Structures are given as C-alpha cells and as structure tokens.
Amino acid sequence: MPFITYSTHPFKDQKPGTSGLRKRVEVFRQGHYLHNFVQAVFDTQTELIGGTLVLGGDGRFFNREAIQIILKMAAANGLARVLVGQNGLLSTPAASCVIRKYAAAGGLILSASHNPGGPDGDFGIKFNMANGGPANEQLTDAIFARTLEIADFRSTEGDDIPLDTVGSYQLGDMSVEVIDPVSDYAELMAGIFDFEAIRGLLAGGFRIRFDAMHAITGPYAQRILEQQLGAPAGTVINAEPKEDFGGHHPDPNLVHAAELVAMTKGPEGADFAAASDGDGDRNMILGHDFFVTPSDSLAVLAANARLIPAHAAGIPGVARSMPTSQAVDHVARDLGIECFETPTGWKFFGNLLDAGRIAFCGEESFGTGSDHVREKDGLWAVLAWLNVIARRGQSVADIVTGHWQRYGRNYYSRHDYEGINSKAAGELMKTLRDRLPQLQGGSLDGRDVAYADDFSYTDPIDGSVSERQGIRIGFADGSRIVFRLSGTGTVGATLRVYLESFQPDPAQQQLDPQVALASLIETANRLAEIESRTGRAAPDVIT
Ligand code: G1P
Ligand code: ZN
C-alpha cells in the first residue's frame, strides 16, 4: 500500500486546553486541521512508532470519519498496531483501561466531553500517555509547538476499516484490532467492587436509575448495571449513543439531567440515580430527592473507602483540584493520610496516582476517580456509591447527612458566566490579580483574609511548576472564593466563580447552599465587578 506525504500549512490555534484540543466541528473539518494535529502527535510521541495506539471516541458527529483518517495516518507513520473500539466507540475511562491493560504506548480519544455534539456542536481530540492518563503539560506543549511548524503529514489512500464488527484487519504493515469497547472495562469494575453486595441490594428492591444522556455510557451501564448486577431492564435511560446526543447537552448536572432528577421525587421516586456525560468520565449522584455535590461525593467515598474490596486495606492519600471544596481535607486529616490540592484538570493527578501517593481524587466539576485508571470515571463513581450503600445499608441522604455531622458541612456552589467577551474576562482577572497584595492580611466584608493568591502548583513528583491556575481568596473561617477562566470552552470566555463556606454545627447544616453562601456570593460579585465588566446580572449556570 503506497504511503503518501501531503503538504499542509500550520494552524495557529491548536493549543490543547484543560482536556485536549476542543473546537467547533466546522473548525475540525476545515482543510487538514485534524491531520495536522494527529501528525504533530506522531512526530513528538516517537514511542508510538512501532508501538500500539488505542483509539476511540464518544461517538459524536465526525467520530467515525476522524477514526478512519487517524487509522490511515497511523499506518503511514509506522505504528505497529491500533486497538480501536467497535463502531469507533470507547468511553474515556475505558480507553484509559485499555491503554494500561494492553501496555499501549498511548491513546487518542475523540471527544469534547460534555459539550454539545452534531454538525453545529463541538469535537475534540486528546492524547493519553502510556500510563493511560491525559498528556502532561510538557507533552501538550511539545505537540502544540509542532503544530506551529508542521509542513506535511503522512497518510494512505487505502480502504476504510469496517468498524462495526469485532475482528482483526491489516492496513499495510499495521494491524487494526476492532475490540468490544465494554468487556475489558466491565472486567476491571468486577475486580474492584463488591458485586455480590450490590446484587443483593438491587434484588432487595432498591430502585435505581441511570441516565446515559444518549452518550457513550449507555452500552457500559446496560452491560454492568442491568446484565451483570441484575437491575431491571430499562434502568438505564437514554441508553442509545447518538451523534448529537439527542440534541441535548450531555452534561450530568441538575440543569441538563432534569428528566433524571424528576425521577427521584415523590413516593415512587428512585432511591438512587446517576448520570454520566458525553465521554463517560463525569458523574452526578442523586439519592431520593437528594443531590450529592461532587465535592461531598469525593469526601464520602474517601471516608468509606475500606468498604470497597479493592481498597479494604485503606487508601494512602487523596487529591482534589484547587476549586473543589475542602470537604475531603477533613476526611484526610481524620484518616491521617496525605491530601493534595492540584490545578484544575485530571492530568495533574497522574503523577500522584503513578507514585502511589493517592488512590482517590476528584473535581467539583462532577469528576471522581481512583487509581484503577488515569482518567476520572463516571461509572466507577456510581458503582462505588452502590457498593457503599449496599455495605452500610443506609440511604444516600442518611450517609451524607451523617458525614456532615461528623466532619462538618462545606456548603459549595459554582457560578458560571458563559460566552462572555474574552477581553473583558481577561481584564477582570487581571484587576483581581493586581488587587491581591492589598487583600492579603486584611478583611473583606467582615471576614478576615487568611490568604489571597493566584494558585501555583509544584508537582511533588517531578517538580514541574504550573502557574496562574486561578485566583483564590481564603478566609480565616474556612470559607473561600475562587475565580478562574475555563480552559475548555469554545466560544468567548467562561468565568467560573467557586464559593465555599464551612459549617460545623449540625443544627445549621440543612440550608439551601445559595442561601448559606449568599453573603459570600455578594462579596465575590462586588470584588470582581462582575456585572459592570461582563454585562451579566446573574450567572448562566449554577451548580
Ligand atoms: C472543566 C472543569 C474541570 C475538568 C474539565 C474537563 O474545565 O472545570 O474540572 O477537568 O472541564 O472535564 P474548565 O472548563 O473549567 O477549564
Ligand atoms: Zn467528559
């Protein structure tokens, strides 16, 4: 099969963000946009040459086409083998699992996560390393640098590989194995959790619902929850993956998974419900008429880790992204284990997981996971909760309120201002940054400021430093305000304001978070001059 070198010209905007390169579909489909990025990966990740690549995506519009483009380029670039999910599908955590299990040199995951799909939606591509985790900043910087100077790419004009059937194919000297996207992952889950206890819970009439949001997790949840654990058929709703996610936002939160939330209300409501996002790495956990914030979810799972067979001996440490609430810090202190505060993005957990310093980690943005893979994992969190519920014999609400009574409650909320003017957003952040020295040691609306900085992280394993990761103002009473700009948006800028306060008194732990946080919200809005700078009187999304 003849391999051909095609000439191309660089695009200037291929810098990966918080989680890979994400752009509108139309951007990815212009000229050789995708080809350039993939060639830059092959040019910089030389261990792929002669090695194995894992390839799959969340099934969104352009997924199939992109897979065929990448397969041909992989063959022309001298890769030995590609493991690709059937129909081009692999959830992000399953891709991480497959990379690790088959000792691949890396993986390419096609997804824009929870961003909408379809011809007018978003597409994305992300390189994962041999440990199964997202490329670290040195790698993404190298890939980006290469995209700026790229002059040609290699490919071939061979036939498309039939992706709908599991089997082995040849593309020149390269073998392509189309694999069942679910089985390796399902096997991993069965080795971690107490499936017997969960089966017993479900057989006893505990009612659960899982919303796959017409995204990647439908086939995974049906196999594991319905077929292996015995949940009734139909437990998984919106189970069929669709290229446009049925026209919805595949983002598991109270706004976008409203249908599921409604199923937890009333006397017939489910005892437990959960949802996952476009590529299967996020999760939302609900009890009967009860929402578990992702920050609390991490803390509760850490406190109950020993009930999960794979962690029966206890966990060495935990980590949370900086804007995530400090709920898990209280648990770590109590357990006498390490607790790390990292910048936003799963890639910052990789070194800590590889070094065995932490076993559980999470982000406020509906991301929770463990050392079983190097991505956050929606279904892992769901199974972890079911495992804990089955072993404790308590409802979700009782587990969480009991947790607050013991450790105190961290009221928490995130306010997002989406699609605002990029220049205005930059100026807002700059003004805040300039004010930090004045805030230090002072007080703000009656609260003493304990620290005020632009978060900088030194990786304890490799010593790399990541600066300007968000402005945080911490108060002496344990409350915090954090401001940062999103690194995943594709239109304008998104300002995220994270708010947190600490309430140790059980008698005061039942408030609506927006009420409990009201004065802090006011302080944040005033300090950042949000309305005058962005023209927005209220956030677009509150989680
Ligand atoms: C968002 C979340 C972040 C998460 C990322 C990828 O990034 O805030 O926690 O890791 O999506 O799922 P952001 O848009 O804030 O940069
Ligand atoms: Zn995702």
Image (cartoon, rainbow, N blue to C red):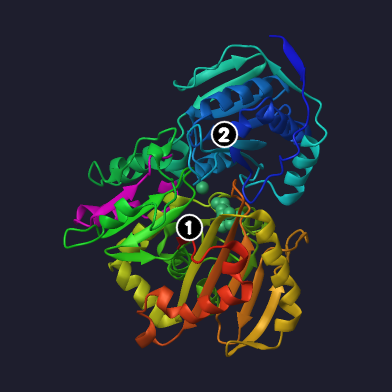
Pinpoint residue 172: horizontal percent, then vertical percent: 66, 13
What amino acid does circle 1 point to? Phe
Measure the alpha-carbon separation of dots 2 and 1: 25 Å
Pinpoint residue 351: horizontal percent, then vertical percent: 67, 56
Mark 2 and ligand 2: say if the CB distance to the nearest ligand atom is below 8 Å. Answer: no
Most foreground residue, 82 or 286: 286
Q: Is residue 304 magenta?
A: no
Q: Is residue 209 magenta?
A: yes
Quarter holding the N terminus is: top right
Query: Quarter of the image holding residue 470?
Result: bottom right
Most foreground residue, 142 or 207: 142
Say above or below: 76 vs 429.
above
Which label belongs to residue 13? none
In the visual, does 12 lie left or right of 281? right
Q: Are marks 2 and 1 in contact (CB under 8 Å)?
A: no
> Could you tell me which residue is drawn at 74 percent across and 20 percent down?
154
Quarter holding the C terminus is: bottom left
Which label belongs to residue 366? 1
Which label belongs to residue 25? 2
Say above or below: 413 vs 99.
below
Instruction: Report helix, strand or loop for mark 1.
Output: loop
Pinpoint residue 99: horizontal percent, then vertical percent: 59, 39
Residue density around tag 1, few if under 14, some if 14–19, many if 20 or more, within 10 Å:
many
Pinpoint residue 288: horizontal percent, then vertical percent: 27, 63
Say above or below: 415 vs 205.
below
Residue density around tag 2, few if under 14, some if 14–19, many if 20 or more, within 10 Å:
many
What amino acid does circle 2 point to? Val
> Could you tell me which residue is drawn at 37 percent across and 79 percent down?
511
Instruction: Report helix, strand or loop for mark 2.
Output: helix
**Which sits earlier in the primary sequence, circle 2 or circle 1?**
2
Residue range of the region highlighted in magenta in the rendering: 189-215
Name the quarter showing ligand 1: bottom right
